[in-house]
Image (cartoon, rainbow, N blue to C red):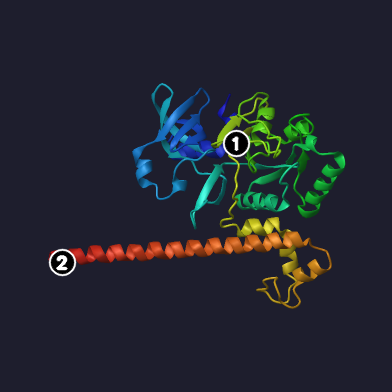
Amino acid sequence: MTLEDLGYHTELENYRKDNNLSSFEVGRVISEHKERYVVKTVSKEYDAEIIGNLRFTAQKRSDFPAVGDWVAISEYEDDKALIHHIFPRKTIVERQAVGKHGEKQIIATNIDYGLLVQAVDRDFNINRLERYLTICHTSNIEPIIVLNKIDLIDKDRLDELENKVKDRIEKIPVISISNETQTGIDELKELIKKGKTYCLLGSSGVGKSSLLNTLMGEEMMKTDLISESTSKGRHITSHREMMVLKDGGIVIDNPGMREIGIADAEIGLEITFEKIINLSKQCKFKDCTHTNEIKCAVLEAIEKGEIDSSLYENYQKMVKEEKHYEATVAEKRKKDKDFGKMIKQFKKSRKSNKY
């Protein structure tokens, strides 16, 4: 195995030289467990932790390593290493942190493609697909839609679902697969390129870990049996983990996400909902909200059946969510600024009182 097999490229090597990191070994973070990391190099895997200076200078959670990061390390014991430096990230896949207003959570870094996995037999949901698409577009990574478990439905139902996806989501590859029958697996493998990194995104039970096992050719990730009463596979991936495929390509598996909060996603929304954005240029008012204005091109297109009303509703919901996130961030910054001023005044007051 070479560093290139892990996704290393010329820009990273140039950065390493320019920043005097040549004395360190280079590796990639393949898993994270509460600020303990597994770093993979050409020769071995290390149990790693960050040096004190990195911890001391970190101002936010994103300043710590994440799965997919390239790092400079030094070995201090057999199979143990210290992380001295995090290389610049080419891409960052993130969402709004669950239960933390105005904060983001990194899903993975340095991703080239997002594999958006949905099972066709249970909670198939195009709205959710559009959320994952927006995350991909915001992160500047290429999405690929994977419809999984097609062995559990008949051909007519599959054709119906494929048409629904393609009618509403244009210009994105859609591949239908079955891990049981291996249908579509070769087609998917053809899209996986050596040295490129793919991130599996989807809810619990859609078959992400089973798909990774299929791509690996062996059972690397644990899966549970499907419940006969609910038809839901109990997904037991508890952390993000990166795997290198035998035939090339790197895949990151993720725990299923119940909440897919949109954060700082204006550009992503514009790409995902390109139909609506293009039509909005024809609205009478530049600041049209597409809710009740006269001569709104978007509302007129919905009335004529040119735009799916579900697409429009999902767009409005996600725009509102994105604006709420921005407002929360602005409020948080103001509070931090006010707190900083208060501390500064307090220190000044104490200094004056000394004399």
Residue 29: give x, y in percent of width and height: 51, 34
Q: Circle 2 sits in a helix, a strand or a loop, which is it?
A: helix
Q: Tag 2: Cα neighbours inside 10 Å, few (<14), some, or many (≥20)?
A: few
Residue with the mark numbered 2? 353
User: In the rendered structure, which disc, 2 or 1, sits on the residue that comes first in sequence?
Assistant: 1
Q: Nearer the viewer, residue 229 or 177?
A: 229
Identify the residue at horizontal 59%, vertical 50% (top origin). Answer: 259
Residue 125 circle label: none
Asked whether the viewer can see residue 224, the reply is yes
Q: Report, in whole angstroms, how far the alpha carbon at label 2 lies from the one at label 1.
A: 57 Å
Identify the residue at horizontal 73%, vertical 32% (top origin). Answer: 189
Q: Circle 1 sits in a helix, a strand or a loop, which is it?
A: strand
Q: Tag 1: Cα neighbours inside 10 Å, few (<14), some, or many (≥20)?
A: many
Residue 249 to residue 59: above or below? above
Identify the residue at horizontal 44%, vertical 62% (top origin). Answer: 332
Q: Nearer the viewer, residue 5 or 116?
A: 116
Residue 86 to residue 214: above or below? below
Residue 104: give x, y in percent of width and height: 51, 52
User: The C terminus appears in which quarter of the rendering?
Assistant: bottom left
Residue 153: give x, y in percent of width and height: 81, 39
Assess whether mark 1 and mark 2 are in contact (beta carbons under 8 angstroms).
no
Residue 252 circle label: 1
Q: Residue furthest front?
A: 229
Mark 1 is on which residue type?
Ile
Mark 2 is on which residue type?
Asn
Q: Residue furthest left?
A: 355
Residue 80: give x, y in percent of width and height: 41, 26
